Amino acid sequence: MQLNGPQRRNRFAAAALSLLGASSAATAHADDGSDWTFDTSTLLYAEGAGRVKVFEPKVNASLHLDESRTLAATVTVDALSGATPNGAAPYSKPQTFFQPHSTSGSSGSSSSSGVNSTYTTAAYELPKDPNFENLRGALEIDYSFAPAAKQHMDLSTALSVEDDYTSIGVGGHWSRDFNQGNTTLGAGLNFSSDFISPVGGVNTPLSQMVGSIANGPSSKLKLVQDMVVGVTQLVSPRSLVQVNYSLSHSNGYLNDPYKILSVVDATAAPLYYVYESRPGSRLKNSLYTHYKARAMGTDVFDASYRYMIDTWGIRSHTVELSYRAYIAGERGYLEPHLRGYRQSAADFFHAALDQGQVAGTRFASADQRLGAFTAYTGGLEYGDRHWAGHDWSVRAEYYRQLGKVEGLPPVAGNALARYDVAPSLSAGWLIFSLGFR
Amino acid sequence: MNFRSIAVLAALSVLPGCVAVKPWQHDILARPDMQPASNPLQAGLEDHIYFSKEASSGGRGFGGGGCGCN
């Protein structure tokens, strides 16, 4: 997740700023002579129905060496707990599953290594693993400089560590101003290597779930290569347009090691469960357009649209709108925000499988994130830009995901249609941000 | 109004006619609140949420990855 982190975004912000005659977002605030700037943002996130809760603070320290050179470090801690869908379909009776987290407590038998443990989910409900928890730490180092006049370069490296997942990455982004600073062209590359070591080991895709300990190797590798090219164009003294095209290729182990599918009979009764199986490579293409303009004096209107298409058969549309209205003589602001998102399902998405399908398929996943759904976000941010010389903001957002039922097995389609196989998801979050100047 | 029409409207809204902006007119656009992501840490936290709940990621920057959340 940290590949979308602040340093990488800073890189694009810095590219746009260089276009505008400043050097970076941080140095734009450093005109009081200070060489250091510090920023923090803390996320409190909770999903409805007792699902996931997250506490995630981020701290960024930037050392501005001179007008064009900045060295920055960002530290993230990400603590997550709660229940998460395991991929199985609901049924009219309670269902029992092996707990992959063999060292976690569970409602079943015991928990030492090598001993199976289980949990049981309620009838009619979408089965969830109740013991999902994770602690992640991440560090990003970023160095930005001007290799030549009108040019900006940003180099970064990132490390993210959690119990069962480690990622290391390096990246670079270059940009150059043209046309009296009205146009900036940019290009960037990023590479990461991720090491996945599921608790209990790696299960063979589409193999039957028979215990807490996996039947495969202890770890797997995933490689990700990202490329982005973009242009930022000033279209008036009060507005700009940004267009980015990005390509992301990943290969290796792309499964979620803990996700399963139900194999059901004609009455939708689960016969057994199998581990999901995703293709070993994925290519995503995204086109992102962003329009930003001054309105009503100093207010800011922001609109963006992204289209994504990938080789797994997923298409998505994302639209975001926000309006920052300054109040109290620009000391503070109120910013309402709306977001709409829709995606189609992956070609291999199945809500469940029947026995004929298991025999005939290579790839299958019941992960709702690969299914079809529409989602909406609405929120409001308040910010104070002159609090004892610093600035702070608080942002509250509400997210609702409305699932679409797809991928029912032919043999049990009617029987499964009685259940809520794609329940809606609600989540809310608060983000507190503080910038020390 | 379906999603596609919203997308078309959004695309049209970003196609006003370009005018030459003189260097001395860049000051309004140089303010931090006019940057593509005016609060990068906050944007990073929200990208993380969407990356862990949806199949798409990236656009503004690189396409996501680096954690076990998706």
Image (cartoon, rainbow, N blue to C red):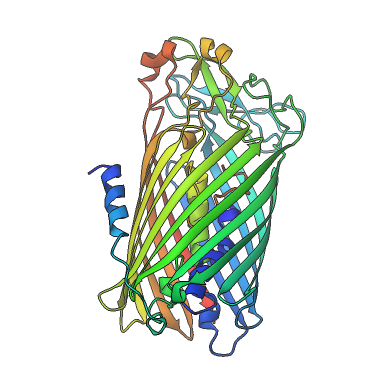
Residue occupying image coordinates x 45% and y 43%: A308
Residue A208 position by quadrant: top right
Up-down relation of residue A358 to residue A48 (above or below): above
Total numbered labels placed on residues in the image: 0
Residue occupying image coordinates x 39% and y 16%: A413
Up-down relation of residue A317 to residue A361 (above or below): below
Camera-side residue of A55 and A23 = A23
Whether residue A255 appears in this view of the structure is no
Up-down relation of residue A284 to residue A203 (above or below): below
Camera-side residue of A74 and A170 = A170
Camera-side residue of A75 and A339 = A339
Where is residue A263? Give x, y as percent: 53, 16
Q: Quadrant of the C terminus of chain A?
A: bottom right
Q: Which residue is the extreme one toward the front?
A: A179
Where is residue A436? Give x, y as percent: 54, 79
Where is residue A254? Give x, y as percent: 62, 36
Q: Which residue is the extreme one toward the bottom?
A: A33
Where is residue A291? Give x, y as percent: 36, 62
Is A299 displayed left or right of A118 in the figure? left
Whether residue A315 appears in this view of the structure is yes
Camera-side residue of B61 and B44 = B61
